[in-house]
Image (spheres, grey):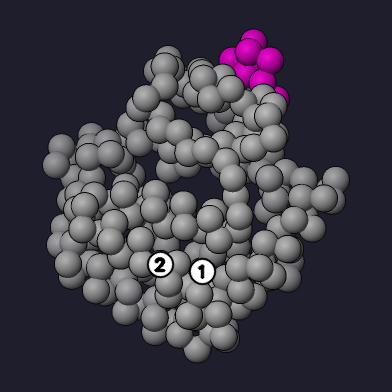
Amino acid sequence: MNLQFRGTAAHSMLGKLDDVQFTRRDYQHRTRLAALDAPDRVRWLSIPTHLPHGRHSLIQDALIADPTSARRRTAAMIRHEYRASPHWATLQTALEPVWDAFDTGRTAAVAETSTRVLLDLFGWNGRVLAASGLPARPERSQRLADLTAAAGAGTYLCGTGGMTYLDPAPFTARGITVAPFLPPTTGIWANARRVTALWALAHLGPDALAARLRALASSPDSLEAAA
């Protein structure tokens, strides 16, 4: 589970909520793969995950049930969907660290590595910070505000789901701006909220997709969507 910050310095920061409860119904161990030639045709890709402390297990404690099998199955499914892409050779090389992360036996390691690989492909120069290493109070909105402040960021990007429960008061008290994270909903972004970014990468390639994101970032109406 990731938090997105935009700092007062030149680079952004990404915070990983590694010390919160693992939730099976979320996207912490699964995603949807969209077919290369038909993005509306999707199927689930899940990493079988064991929770050593039951439903109270933290994200950082979640274990891959069978790392060798999960690695093989994940690689095979992604290869099946995207090997016809003209950008497959680039993606295949970029994904090697993700396959290695399965050897740790930790679901969070795979999630973090895959996120880092994606950001590296886009030339992102920010920092990834673990919530477990930052001081924060327990209440949900206070915690998010504390983590944003501890990261030295001036803006917290909040998704549409989070905006329904977020209390802005702790952020205001710390002089932090809460900005809505609103991804575009047309063109290649139409399915962006429900499928893995691998589809867009396979469809356009890293350079072209990064260019589209930069174009969004330069548009005042879409600034928060591409941040």
How many numbered badges does the structure rendering display? 2
Q: Looking at the picture, does residue 128 appear above or below residue 85?
A: above
Q: Position of residue 84 (x, y in %)?
A: 50, 89
Q: Which residue is mark 2?
A: 95
Which of pointers 2 and 1 indicates the residue nearer the eye? 2
Is 123 displayed left or right of 55 in the figure? right
Q: Is residue 11 visible?
A: yes
Nearer-the-camera pick, 57 or 132: 132
Q: Are marks 2 and 1 in contact (CB under 8 Å)?
A: no
Task: Please tell me which of labels 2 and 1 falls first in the chain.
Answer: 2
Q: Residue at x 35, y 78 (%)?
A: 77
Question: How far from the left and from the top, in percent, is residue 169?
Answer: 63, 15
Furthest residue in direction right, as rendered: 220
Q: Is residue 38 above or below residue 116?
A: below
Q: Amino acid at mark 1?
A: Leu
Q: Is residue 5 magenta?
A: no
Q: Is residue 4 above or below residue 39?
A: above
Residue 130, percent from left and from top = 40, 33
Q: Residue at x 24, y 49 (%)?
A: 106
| Local SS, label 1 | helix
- Span shown in magenta: 169-178
Under mark 2, the amino acid is Leu
Q: Residue at x 54, y 84 (%)?
A: 85
Asked where in the image residue 97 lies, by quadrant, the reply is: bottom left
- Which residue is identified by label 1? 198
